[in-house]
Amino acid sequence: MSPGITVFWESSRWLIYVVDRFEPGDKALAIDSKGRRYMFTLQPGGSFHFHRGILVHDDILGAHDGVGLTSTGSEKVTIFHPTYVDFVLKMPRGAQVVYPKDAAMILIEGDIYPGARVLEAGAGSGALSIALLRAIGPQGELVTYELRDDFARIARANVESMLGKVENFEIRLGDVYQPIGDEVFDRAVLDLPEPWQVIPQLVECLRPGGILTCYLPTILQVHQLTRELVSGNGWTAPRTTETLVRSWHVTERSVRPDHRMVAHTGYLTVVRFAG
Ligand code: SAH
Protein backbone atom coordinates (compact mmCIF):
# COMPACT_ATOMS: atom_id res chain seq x y z
CA MET A 1 0.00 0.00 0.00
CA SER A 2 1.44 3.40 -0.86
CA PRO A 3 -0.29 6.44 0.61
CA GLY A 4 0.03 9.43 -1.71
CA ILE A 5 -1.37 12.92 -1.87
CA THR A 6 -3.80 13.65 -4.69
CA VAL A 7 -5.12 17.12 -5.44
CA PHE A 8 -8.47 17.72 -7.20
CA TRP A 9 -10.08 20.92 -8.54
CA GLU A 10 -13.75 20.52 -7.65
CA SER A 11 -16.63 23.02 -7.37
CA SER A 12 -14.27 26.04 -7.54
CA ARG A 13 -11.94 24.80 -4.80
CA TRP A 14 -8.94 22.59 -4.40
CA LEU A 15 -9.44 19.32 -2.49
CA ILE A 16 -6.55 17.34 -1.13
CA TYR A 17 -6.98 13.61 -0.50
CA VAL A 18 -4.64 11.02 0.91
CA VAL A 19 -5.06 8.07 -1.43
CA ASP A 20 -3.84 4.51 -0.84
CA ARG A 21 -2.83 3.17 -4.22
CA PHE A 22 -2.62 -0.57 -4.85
CA GLU A 23 0.84 -2.06 -5.18
CA PRO A 24 2.08 -5.55 -6.11
CA GLY A 25 1.73 -7.88 -3.11
CA ASP A 26 -1.22 -5.96 -1.65
CA LYS A 27 -4.43 -7.80 -0.86
CA ALA A 28 -7.44 -6.56 -2.83
CA LEU A 29 -11.06 -6.99 -1.78
CA ALA A 30 -13.63 -6.97 -4.61
CA ILE A 31 -17.27 -6.32 -3.64
CA ASP A 32 -19.85 -7.17 -6.34
CA SER A 33 -23.33 -5.78 -6.96
CA LYS A 34 -24.86 -8.30 -4.48
CA GLY A 35 -22.37 -7.39 -1.74
CA ARG A 36 -20.38 -10.63 -2.17
CA ARG A 37 -16.74 -10.26 -1.23
CA TYR A 38 -13.66 -11.80 -2.83
CA MET A 39 -10.09 -11.34 -1.62
CA PHE A 40 -6.94 -11.92 -3.67
CA THR A 41 -3.29 -10.85 -3.79
CA LEU A 42 -2.24 -8.47 -6.57
CA GLN A 43 0.55 -9.42 -8.97
CA PRO A 44 1.59 -7.76 -12.23
CA GLY A 45 0.10 -9.81 -15.09
CA GLY A 46 -2.22 -11.66 -12.68
CA SER A 47 -5.96 -12.17 -12.93
CA PHE A 48 -8.81 -13.12 -10.58
CA HIS A 49 -11.43 -15.54 -11.91
CA PHE A 50 -14.90 -15.75 -10.38
CA HIS A 51 -18.38 -16.75 -11.55
CA ARG A 52 -18.92 -13.32 -13.11
CA GLY A 53 -15.78 -13.41 -15.26
CA ILE A 54 -12.25 -12.13 -14.79
CA LEU A 55 -10.65 -9.12 -13.09
CA VAL A 56 -7.24 -8.15 -14.44
CA HIS A 57 -4.76 -7.20 -11.68
CA ASP A 58 -3.02 -4.61 -13.88
CA ASP A 59 -6.31 -2.63 -13.94
CA ILE A 60 -6.12 -2.41 -10.14
CA LEU A 61 -2.38 -1.85 -9.61
CA GLY A 62 -1.72 1.88 -9.29
CA ALA A 63 -5.45 2.63 -8.88
CA HIS A 64 -6.86 4.16 -5.69
CA ASP A 65 -8.73 2.48 -2.83
CA GLY A 66 -12.36 2.23 -3.95
CA VAL A 67 -11.71 2.01 -7.68
CA GLY A 68 -14.67 0.71 -9.75
CA LEU A 69 -14.15 -1.95 -12.44
CA THR A 70 -16.29 -4.11 -14.72
CA SER A 71 -15.41 -7.81 -15.00
CA THR A 72 -15.29 -9.62 -18.35
CA GLY A 73 -18.74 -11.00 -17.38
CA SER A 74 -20.14 -7.41 -17.10
CA GLU A 75 -20.27 -7.45 -13.28
CA LYS A 76 -19.54 -4.08 -11.67
CA VAL A 77 -17.22 -4.43 -8.70
CA THR A 78 -15.58 -2.00 -6.31
CA ILE A 79 -12.06 -2.75 -5.10
CA PHE A 80 -10.86 -1.87 -1.59
CA HIS A 81 -7.97 -2.65 0.70
CA PRO A 82 -9.46 -5.29 3.04
CA THR A 83 -10.30 -4.23 6.59
CA TYR A 84 -9.52 -6.33 9.67
CA VAL A 85 -12.95 -8.02 9.45
CA ASP A 86 -12.62 -8.73 5.71
CA PHE A 87 -9.17 -10.19 6.19
CA VAL A 88 -9.87 -12.34 9.27
CA LEU A 89 -12.98 -13.94 7.76
CA LYS A 90 -11.10 -14.88 4.58
CA MET A 91 -7.56 -15.63 5.76
CA PRO A 92 -6.16 -19.21 5.94
CA ARG A 93 -7.05 -20.92 9.22
CA GLY A 94 -5.41 -23.51 11.40
CA ALA A 95 -7.31 -23.24 14.67
CA GLN A 96 -10.78 -21.67 14.89
CA VAL A 97 -10.41 -17.89 15.04
CA VAL A 98 -11.86 -15.42 17.52
CA TYR A 99 -14.78 -13.80 15.72
CA PRO A 100 -14.57 -10.03 15.10
CA LYS A 101 -17.49 -9.30 17.49
CA ASP A 102 -15.53 -11.01 20.28
CA ALA A 103 -12.17 -9.50 19.28
CA ALA A 104 -13.81 -6.06 19.52
CA MET A 105 -14.99 -6.76 23.07
CA ILE A 106 -11.63 -8.24 24.10
CA LEU A 107 -9.84 -5.03 23.05
CA ILE A 108 -12.24 -2.77 24.97
CA GLU A 109 -13.22 -4.89 28.00
CA GLY A 110 -9.63 -6.12 28.30
CA ASP A 111 -8.45 -2.50 28.05
CA ILE A 112 -5.72 -3.15 25.49
CA TYR A 113 -4.01 0.22 25.03
CA PRO A 114 -1.21 1.72 22.90
CA GLY A 115 2.18 0.78 24.32
CA ALA A 116 0.91 -2.15 26.42
CA ARG A 117 3.02 -5.28 26.86
CA VAL A 118 0.57 -8.15 26.30
CA LEU A 119 0.81 -11.89 26.92
CA GLU A 120 -1.40 -13.97 24.62
CA ALA A 121 -2.04 -17.73 24.31
CA GLY A 122 -2.55 -19.59 22.05
CA ALA A 123 -1.73 -17.89 18.80
CA GLY A 124 -3.98 -20.24 16.79
CA SER A 125 -4.51 -18.64 13.38
CA GLY A 126 -3.34 -15.21 14.53
CA ALA A 127 -6.71 -13.45 14.20
CA LEU A 128 -6.67 -12.10 17.73
CA SER A 129 -2.92 -11.38 17.48
CA ILE A 130 -3.61 -9.00 14.59
CA ALA A 131 -6.26 -7.13 16.60
CA LEU A 132 -3.96 -6.94 19.65
CA LEU A 133 -1.00 -5.70 17.58
CA ARG A 134 -3.10 -2.97 16.03
CA ALA A 135 -4.35 -1.86 19.45
CA ILE A 136 -0.94 -1.78 21.17
CA GLY A 137 0.73 -0.04 18.22
CA PRO A 138 4.46 0.05 17.48
CA GLN A 139 5.36 1.06 21.07
CA GLY A 140 3.65 -2.02 22.55
CA GLU A 141 4.83 -5.59 22.61
CA LEU A 142 2.93 -8.85 22.04
CA VAL A 143 4.27 -12.19 23.26
CA THR A 144 2.09 -15.13 22.25
CA TYR A 145 2.50 -18.78 23.20
CA GLU A 146 1.51 -21.60 20.87
CA LEU A 147 1.88 -25.36 21.35
CA ARG A 148 1.73 -26.33 17.70
CA ASP A 149 4.45 -25.45 15.24
CA ASP A 150 2.05 -25.62 12.25
CA PHE A 151 -0.36 -23.15 13.91
CA ALA A 152 2.50 -20.84 14.90
CA ARG A 153 3.57 -20.67 11.26
CA ILE A 154 0.01 -19.96 10.05
CA ALA A 155 -0.37 -17.25 12.73
CA ARG A 156 2.86 -15.50 11.73
CA ALA A 157 2.02 -15.71 8.03
CA ASN A 158 -1.44 -14.20 8.66
CA VAL A 159 -0.07 -11.43 10.88
CA GLU A 160 2.57 -10.48 8.29
CA SER A 161 0.11 -10.74 5.45
CA MET A 162 -2.13 -8.13 7.15
CA LEU A 163 0.45 -5.94 8.91
CA GLY A 164 3.74 -6.56 7.08
CA LYS A 165 6.89 -7.28 9.11
CA VAL A 166 6.25 -6.58 12.80
CA GLU A 167 9.22 -6.22 15.13
CA ASN A 168 7.16 -6.21 18.34
CA PHE A 169 5.52 -9.65 17.89
CA GLU A 170 7.10 -12.76 19.38
CA ILE A 171 5.63 -16.25 19.05
CA ARG A 172 7.00 -18.65 21.66
CA LEU A 173 6.58 -22.26 20.66
CA GLY A 174 5.69 -23.94 23.93
CA ASP A 175 3.21 -24.66 26.69
CA VAL A 176 1.94 -21.59 28.56
CA TYR A 177 0.81 -23.94 31.38
CA GLN A 178 4.53 -24.23 32.23
CA PRO A 179 6.44 -21.50 34.10
CA ILE A 180 7.10 -18.26 32.18
CA GLY A 181 10.42 -16.41 32.58
CA ASP A 182 11.12 -13.46 34.79
CA GLU A 183 9.18 -10.70 33.00
CA VAL A 184 6.23 -8.34 33.41
CA PHE A 185 3.08 -7.91 31.35
CA ASP A 186 0.38 -5.22 31.51
CA ARG A 187 -2.37 -7.37 30.05
CA ALA A 188 -3.00 -11.09 29.40
CA VAL A 189 -5.43 -12.54 26.87
CA LEU A 190 -6.07 -16.30 26.89
CA ASP A 191 -7.92 -18.32 24.26
CA LEU A 192 -7.18 -21.92 25.23
CA PRO A 193 -9.04 -24.73 27.01
CA GLU A 194 -7.76 -24.45 30.62
CA PRO A 195 -6.82 -20.84 31.38
CA TRP A 196 -6.86 -21.56 35.14
CA GLN A 197 -3.62 -23.47 34.54
CA VAL A 198 -1.98 -20.12 33.67
CA ILE A 199 -3.03 -18.38 36.91
CA PRO A 200 0.13 -19.34 38.89
CA GLN A 201 2.33 -17.92 36.10
CA LEU A 202 0.22 -14.74 35.88
CA VAL A 203 0.51 -14.12 39.62
CA GLU A 204 4.26 -13.90 38.98
CA CYS A 205 4.29 -11.86 35.77
CA LEU A 206 1.10 -9.72 35.56
CA ARG A 207 1.71 -6.27 37.00
CA PRO A 208 -0.43 -4.89 39.84
CA GLY A 209 -3.46 -3.32 38.14
CA GLY A 210 -3.06 -5.66 35.18
CA ILE A 211 -6.04 -7.27 33.48
CA LEU A 212 -6.64 -10.88 32.45
CA THR A 213 -9.19 -11.58 29.70
CA CYS A 214 -10.22 -15.18 28.93
CA TYR A 215 -12.28 -16.36 25.98
CA LEU A 216 -13.99 -19.71 26.60
CA PRO A 217 -16.56 -21.67 24.58
CA THR A 218 -18.42 -23.42 27.43
CA ILE A 219 -19.91 -22.11 30.65
CA LEU A 220 -18.45 -25.01 32.62
CA GLN A 221 -14.99 -23.68 31.78
CA VAL A 222 -16.09 -20.19 32.85
CA HIS A 223 -17.35 -21.64 36.12
CA GLN A 224 -14.11 -23.45 36.84
CA LEU A 225 -12.02 -20.38 35.92
CA THR A 226 -14.07 -18.10 38.18
CA ARG A 227 -13.86 -20.54 41.11
CA GLU A 228 -10.07 -20.66 40.79
CA LEU A 229 -9.84 -16.86 40.48
CA VAL A 230 -11.93 -16.05 43.55
CA SER A 231 -10.10 -18.63 45.66
CA GLY A 232 -6.77 -16.88 44.98
CA ASN A 233 -5.46 -13.54 46.19
CA GLY A 234 -5.43 -10.40 44.11
CA TRP A 235 -8.01 -11.35 41.47
CA THR A 236 -10.70 -8.72 41.78
CA ALA A 237 -14.34 -8.85 40.62
CA PRO A 238 -14.29 -11.25 37.65
CA ARG A 239 -17.05 -10.43 35.18
CA THR A 240 -18.40 -12.70 32.43
CA THR A 241 -20.28 -11.55 29.31
CA GLU A 242 -21.33 -12.96 25.99
CA THR A 243 -21.73 -10.85 22.90
CA LEU A 244 -24.66 -11.40 20.54
CA VAL A 245 -24.69 -9.43 17.30
CA ARG A 246 -27.89 -9.42 15.28
CA SER A 247 -27.56 -8.14 11.75
CA TRP A 248 -30.51 -6.63 9.88
CA HIS A 249 -31.85 -6.98 6.37
CA VAL A 250 -32.60 -3.47 5.16
CA THR A 251 -34.13 -2.95 1.71
CA GLU A 252 -36.78 -0.68 0.20
CA ARG A 253 -39.76 -2.89 1.17
CA SER A 254 -38.41 -5.03 3.98
CA VAL A 255 -36.66 -4.00 7.16
CA ARG A 256 -36.19 -6.80 9.67
CA PRO A 257 -33.51 -8.83 11.44
CA ASP A 258 -31.69 -11.35 9.23
CA HIS A 259 -33.12 -14.88 9.49
CA ARG A 260 -29.86 -16.36 10.67
CA MET A 261 -27.34 -15.23 13.24
CA VAL A 262 -24.27 -16.67 14.92
CA ALA A 263 -25.86 -17.99 18.09
CA HIS A 264 -22.78 -18.93 20.04
CA THR A 265 -19.03 -18.41 19.89
CA GLY A 266 -17.61 -17.94 23.38
CA TYR A 267 -17.83 -16.21 26.75
CA LEU A 268 -15.53 -13.46 27.91
CA THR A 269 -14.30 -13.36 31.50
CA VAL A 270 -12.38 -10.23 32.50
CA VAL A 271 -10.66 -9.83 35.84
CA ARG A 272 -8.42 -7.17 37.37
CA PHE A 273 -5.27 -8.17 39.23
CA ALA A 274 -4.39 -6.22 42.38
CA GLY A 275 -0.93 -7.75 42.71
N1 SAH B 1 -7.15 -16.75 19.27
C1 SAH B 1 -6.71 -17.51 18.13
C2 SAH B 1 -7.23 -18.93 18.15
C3 SAH B 1 -6.67 -19.73 19.30
S1 SAH B 1 -7.22 -21.43 19.24
C4 SAH B 1 -7.15 -16.78 16.85
O1 SAH B 1 -7.95 -15.84 16.93
O2 SAH B 1 -6.72 -17.14 15.75
C5 SAH B 1 -6.39 -22.06 20.65
C6 SAH B 1 -4.91 -22.30 20.41
O3 SAH B 1 -4.31 -22.52 21.68
C7 SAH B 1 -4.62 -23.52 19.54
O4 SAH B 1 -3.81 -23.12 18.47
C8 SAH B 1 -3.83 -24.44 20.48
O5 SAH B 1 -2.81 -25.16 19.83
C9 SAH B 1 -3.27 -23.45 21.51
N2 SAH B 1 -3.00 -24.02 22.84
C10 SAH B 1 -3.77 -24.88 23.54
N3 SAH B 1 -3.20 -25.14 24.74
C11 SAH B 1 -2.06 -24.41 24.79
C12 SAH B 1 -1.01 -24.28 25.78
N4 SAH B 1 -1.07 -24.95 26.93
N5 SAH B 1 0.03 -23.45 25.52
C13 SAH B 1 0.08 -22.77 24.34
N6 SAH B 1 -0.87 -22.88 23.37
C14 SAH B 1 -1.92 -23.69 23.59
Image: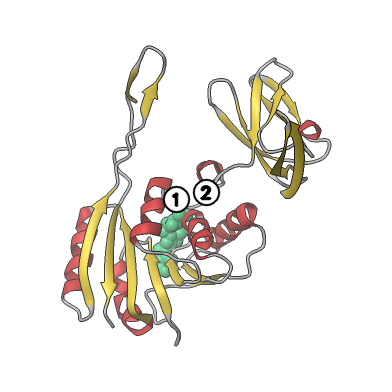
Callout 2: 10 Å neighbours few (<14), some, many (20+)?
some
Write the residue at 51% across / 52% down. 94
Mark 1 C-beta to ligand 1 under 8 Å: yes
Outermost front residue: 12
Write the residue at 53% across / 59% down. 134
Q: Nearer the viewer, mark 2 or mark 1?
A: 1
Asked if residue 3 lies left or right of residue 182, the reply is right
Q: How is the image coloured?
A: secondary structure
Mark 2 C-beta to ligand 1 under 8 Å: yes
For residue 262, what is the image quadrant? top left
**SS under mark 1:** loop
Asked if residue 114 lies left or right of residue 189, the reply is right
Residue linked to disc 1: 97
**SS under mark 2:** loop
Check residue 93 in the rendering and tell me which mark sits there, or answer none. 2
For residue 81, what is the image quadrant? top right
The kind of residue on which mark 1 rests is Val
Write the residue at 60% across / 42% down. 82
